[in-house]
Every structure is written in C-alpha cells, then in structure tokens.
Amino acid sequence: MDEKIAKAEKLLKDYTKGKYAFGTGCIDSLGDFVSEFGKNILLIISPNEWAKALREKIEKVLNDKRINIVARADTSRENSPVEDVFALADLIRTSKPECIVCVGGGSAIDTAKASNVLASLEKDNSRIEKYFGAGEVGKRMQELKVRNLYPFIAVQVASGSGSHISKYANITDLRTSQKKLIIDEEIVPVRAVFDYSFTASMPESLTKDGALDGFSHCLEVYYGFDEKNKDFKLVEQVCLTGISLIVENLPYLINDLEDVGLREKIGIATDLGGYAIMLYGTNGAHLNSFSFVDILPHGRACAILNPYYTVFFTPSIENKLRKLAPIYQEYSDKDLSILKGKKLGIEIARAMTEFSRTIGFPTALSEVKGFNDEHIRRAVNAAKNPQLESKLKNMPVPITSEEVELYIKPVLEAAKEGDFGKIKFRE
C-alpha cells in the first residue's frame, strides 16, 4: 500500500473512531449504521439518470436490512440554496423519521444539516439567520433542553467538501449571491460512508473543483494553526499529507477520470481536508470565495485566491512554506530550498498558480467570465460581517473587521490582476 495512503487511513480512523466507513466497496456499512438508530428513514438522493445505479445500490443495501423509507426527497441544487433548506425542513417535520439519510455531494449534505437544525429546533423556517456563525445550534439546544437533532447519516459521493465528517454547512442566499456558514459540533453527521469508487462518475470540472476545495481546507488550516500548539504535529501531518496527495495525483487523474486508484487518493486527501477543518478553521480564501458564488465554483475560487493569501501571510508562515517547498518544486524554475522571506512566499505562490494553470484553472479573477469590481466590493463587505469573523481570526496574520479595507482589499486587487506586488503587508 502507498505509504501516504496508509498514513491517511490511520489518521482518519483515529479521528472518526468507527463512525465512518471509507474506501472502495464500503457501502454495505450503511445498513448497519442506519440500524443503530431506527428502521424508518427519510432518504435524500438524486432523481437524475446519472444516479440510477447509485439509487439501486443504496436501496438494495437498505432493503437487505429491512429498512423502511417513510419519505423521499431530491438532493438540493448546487450551493445549498436557502429555499431548498426550507423545503427539506418542512418534509422532516411532516415525516418525523427515526433517521435521515442523505446520499449526495457537499451541497446536498450541507442542505440536510441545515434542514435538520430547523426541523429539530424551530416550528417554522423564519429564524434560520440566527444559526449562522459558530456555536449557535448548541446554544439553542441548551435553551430548549433538546439533547439531539434527528440522527443524520451522510453518504458522500463527491470528493471535496468533507461535509460528511465536519461541523460546517454552507448555505446560499441566491438573491444576494452570498454564502453564509453554520459552524457547530452538533451538526456533524452521527455516521458517514464514502465509497471512493462512486466518484468515478464525477466530470472533470467537478473533480478539479472538489480536489482544490479539499486542498484549500488543508492549506488554510495549516497556515492558520499555531506552531507552538501541542497539537501542531498532528495538524501538520494531516494537512501536508492531504496537500501532497492532491498536488501529486490530480494532474494524472484528470487525464484518466476512471482510474479508481487515483480516485481513492484524491478522495482520502479531501477527507483529510474534512478532518483538518475539525482541527481548526479556514481563513482568507474561503471567506472571500463565499462572495463569488455566482461566477465560480467554490474550490476554483479558493484555488485562485490562496496564492495571493500565501504572499500576504508569508512573514508569519516562513517555516511552513519550507515544508511546502518540496511539494511544489516541480512547478517552479527556482530552487525553492534556498529561498527565504518574501521571495520564498512569492515563488511558492507562483508555483501554486503554475499548478492551477497545469490543470486548466484560471490564476487571476480577471480571467473569470462575469467577474467585475462589484465582486470585490461584495467580498470586502462580507468580510466585515460578524457572522464570518472567525475567518479573520483564523488567519496567521489576524485582522479586525476595521482593517479589512486596508489589507483584504489589496489582496483581492492583486488577485484581480494577477499581480503579487499589489499586496500590502502588515507591519
């Protein structure tokens, strides 16, 4: 077995403690997991033709365990629109299942998480706004003396978000094209299953976007986590293993999308990204990506922005950049091992953009169809929102909402033009 895969498996097993079945051929675990919580379930799964074989497989697993599907729902649209959250919450209230099972990608699972919160804690859908931010679900549960939400089991089918093993749910207001985030331990699925072979149906664009989402989880957590913290070695191991698996294998996978071995490597790498965001939060690139939902997939937005944040963070992360240098060396014409300070940060950022170029991603916001200065204004304003304050605090160069114009805006202007020279460093 590949040494990095073996390391990744051990890390994930240590983290999930028997509550997560992952790897090729593991889908039969779903029946046993569901049986722990009850036989009457709400099943959320795509009705589309591409998912026909998946539906048949899932239903066979459930039938074999004599599990009763009391209600069904289609998976949500991309980016978890708030209207889809409301519709699913209403169905949960009506059907009152013993367990909720969602088979889908990150958007479907995020929608199910948020719907479960509303159905469990509210009589209607009017108060969703109060749950955005960190820890608000748990607070409300204490107020109401509610011990648990509906048991929720996630069956992941797309490598990327890590939603099936994390405490995050991204929800989108389509009217404003702005994402908001629920962050709470209470919404982590009670059980999860990810058969990596299911990702072979992912098209090239989604494969790349998902991989770079998982990559960004690892990178941003690695950048933000304090090197002096006693858990830093664990964080470093999780993040660097995930980053290297993606950088080394994604270019090969996009040339052979049906290679199950490569699918497994990308799947387990993005799972490490899901683990990473349970250890610490993401920061700059994720924060700004929420404002580009109308023009960019999430992973692609993060991929564009992270090189520019790498340069901005350089004075605080030089030791970490040295660990990234060997991973990116093949994408640079400079010897990264001998560089120091800002030169090291800029050259690694250039290597990141070269990697993006290699897989066919844009490397500047101006290359994106539909981008305009309104997106920068929206991103700057969103960064000042107290509900997203955790992203500012998670940065290795933490800033306040009052400093967003001074530092975040120049990073976005740099990303617009592809010009690292526009970035303003904090003294």
Image (tube, grey):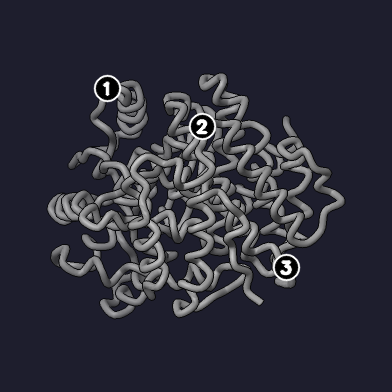
Residue that badge 3 annotates = 227
Mark 1 Cα within 10 Å, few/some/many (few <14, many 20+)?
few
Compared across the picture, whether 152 is left or right of 241 comes to left
Residue 229 position, x and y percent, is 70, 71
Q: Name the residue under label 2.
A: 196
At horizontal 31% and vertical 62% (from top left) the residue drawn is 149
Image quadrant where one finds the N terminus: top right
Work out whether mark 1 precedes mark 3 in sequence or the reverse, and give the earlier one. Answer: 1
* Mark 3 vs 2: CB contact within 8 A: no
Q: In this view, does 228 lie to the left or right of 136?
A: right
Q: Residue 51, relative to residue 416: is it above or below?
A: above
Look at the image and tell me whether residue 380 can be seen: yes
Mark 2 and mark 1 in contact (Cβ < 8 Å)?
no
Find numbered disc 2 in the image and state the secondary structure of the residue it sits on: helix
Earlier sequence position, callout 1 versus callout 2: 1
Q: Position of residue 373 (x, y in %)?
A: 37, 56
Q: What is the three-letter code of the residue carrying label 3?
A: Glu
Number of marks drawn: 3
Residue closer to the observer: 56 or 259:
259
Q: Which residue is drawn at 63% across and 37% down?
A: 355
Using a 10 Å C-alpha cutoff, classify the residue at mark 2 as few (fewer than 14 neighbours), some (14 to 19) or many (20 or more): many
User: Image height check: is 10 above or below 309?
Assistant: above
* Cα distance in 3D space between marks 1 and 3: 48 Å
Q: How far apart are marks 3 and 2 (CA)?
A: 33 Å
